[in-house]
Image: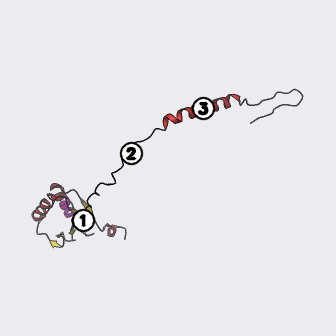
């Protein structure tokens, strides 16, 4: 990138001196070439033994459908639950199983929040780990 300022009759010439820039670039290039083999070291991978037995297939956990109706009725896999004590007993029994079953909670969109909160609190007290809401698309905008 050269720039000429002045006249041809002995005027001032202003040009950028690119020699130091080229020197610095060459030094960086040589440094990169020298240090590159040091940086590329082999990574040891422990590959699986091809003669080993395959792992046993994963068994999907049991799924429990827990429905809460608009009037506060709780249904455990389609069977109505008479009270919170019976629900707590179900949770206590299921929490001791291995693997622990999944609770698919499906509240009605008109269900009271207090009932849903009581059911979730009962599940938490009995150490249920896998709880999820299903069919939540109905709670979207009308």
Q: Which mark is residue 104?
A: 1
Q: Position of residue 98 (x, y in %)?
A: 17, 58
Dot 2, how many residues are within 10 Å of its Cα: few (below 14), some (14-19), or many (20+)? Answer: few
| Alpha-carbon span between mark 1 and mark 2 | 41 Å
Q: Are marks 1 and 3 in contact (CB under 8 Å)?
A: no
Circle nearer the N terminus (1, 3): 3
Magenta span: 112-120
Mark 2 residue element? loop
- Label 3 to label 2, Cα distance in Å? 32 Å
Quarter of the image containing the C terminus?
A: bottom left
| Residue at position x 27%, y 63% in the image | 133
**Which of pointers 1 and 2 lies earlier in the amino acid sequence?**
2
Q: Earlier in the sequence, mark 3 or mark 2?
A: 3
Residue shown at the point (24%, 65%) measured from the top left: 104
Q: Quadrant of the N terminus?
A: top right
Query: What SS does tag 1 mark?
Result: strand
User: Which residue carries the number 2 mark?
Assistant: 45
Disc number for residue 124: none
């Amino acid at each position: 990138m050269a720039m000429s300022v002045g006249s041809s009759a002995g005027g001032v010439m202003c040009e950028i001196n690119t020699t130091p820039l080229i020197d610095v670039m060459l030094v960086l290039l040589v440094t990169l070439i020298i240090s590159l083999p040091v940086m590329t070291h082999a990574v040891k991978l422990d590959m699986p033994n091809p003669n080993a037995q395959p792992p046993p297939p994963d068994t999907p956990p049991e799924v429990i459908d827990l429905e809460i109706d608009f009037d506060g009725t709780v249904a455990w896999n389609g069977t109505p639950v008479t009270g919170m004590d019976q629900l707590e007993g179900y949770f206590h029994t299921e929490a001791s199983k291995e693997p622990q079953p999944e609770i698919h909670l499906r509240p009605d969109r008109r269900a009271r929040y207090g009932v849903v909160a009581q059911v979730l609190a009962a599940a938490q007290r009995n150490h249920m780990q896998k709880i999820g809401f299903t069919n939540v698309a109905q709670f979207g905008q009308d």
